Amino acid sequence: MNDKTLRLGVNVDHVATVRNARGGTHPDPVKAAKEAIAAGADGITAHLREDRRHIRDADIERLRAEITKPLNFEMAATPEMSVMALRVKPHAACIVPERREELTTEGGLDVVGLADGLSSFVGRLNDAGIRVSLFIAADPKQIEMAAKLKAPVIEIHTGAWCDAIAEGHASVADAEWRRIADGVRIASDLGLEVHAGHGLNYATAEQIATLPNLRELNIGHFLMGEALSVGLSQTIVTMRAAMDRGRVRAS
Ligand SMILES: CC(=O)[C@@H](O)[C@H](O)COP(=O)(O)O
Ligand SMILES: NCC(=O)COP(=O)(O)O
């Protein structure tokens, strides 16, 4: 891999959503993670929510023990999740905002407003050798604060852009796209490694892959939905091809 490589992180949360609908052990997010890796995923992402609506503690333990590619552990900035991260020691921890009543992660983490508490939180994870990422909006003030907090990585929340496209709001989508493109550039100039994710599909992944300073996309819900039609392996191969087309357009 060269330093311009765009990695694909596959989020397996919603395999666990289907499993939990009936209880039991099927389908298994760890099995899905292994299949995704065999098909070309560069890493696996899993979000242990406070309410354990999808991924559970045992899934994180098994992912850490059984997968052969880096685990990106998504977590809220709570004492409970800090203990879990420091015990399991994933390759990376992505700090995300969480509200129990939300359907999904609705916005970026307010690292400006939460800076005081986040400083020591990020420091403890950094000291443990875990690569910390902050899941934030593409807002210059948030990006600058992420750099001040000494997080080596940010992940830009792409949900508002993807929603605007899906809902046919072209002018909102254009404005969100410009915000993301500017945010990736600003963050990269500050020395941050830049990732992006939330709500991405084949078309939006291809477009965002044209931003040369992006290093990783984390994609879950769309992939698992597509997998119902064509299977997970084929879905990963098609997503990888979409990202590669974007990279070619960029060069
Ligand atoms: C933080 C994030 O973007 C992902 O974790 C994704 O949201 C999948 O989990 P949820 O759908 O539960 O938010
Ligand atoms: N951090 C974003 C992620 O892991 C996947 O989000 P989604 O594709 O499930 O919306």
Image (cartoon, rainbow, N blue to C red):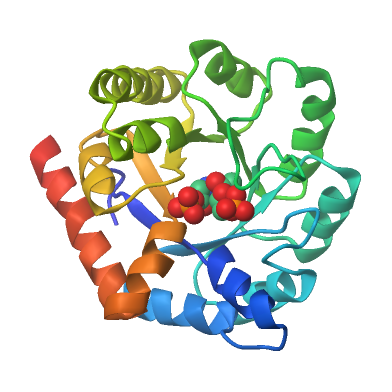
Q: How many marks?
A: 0
The quadrant holding residue 59 is bottom right
Q: Is residue 80 left or right of residue 60?
A: right
Vertical comparison of 37 with 207: above or below = below
Q: Is residue 132 left or right of residue 208?
A: right
Residue 197: x and y, percent? Answer: 44, 44
- Answer whether residue 117 is visible to the viewer in this image: yes
Q: Is residue 98 left or right of residue 31?
A: right
Residue 246: x and y, percent? Answer: 17, 45
Residue 200: x and y, percent? Answer: 36, 47
The residue shown at (78%, 39%) is 77
- Answer whether residue 41 is visible to the viewer in this image: no
Quarter of the picture holding the N terminus: bottom left
The quadrant holding residue 49 is bottom right
The residue shown at (37%, 25%) is 180
Q: Nearer the viewer, residue 121 or 48?
A: 48
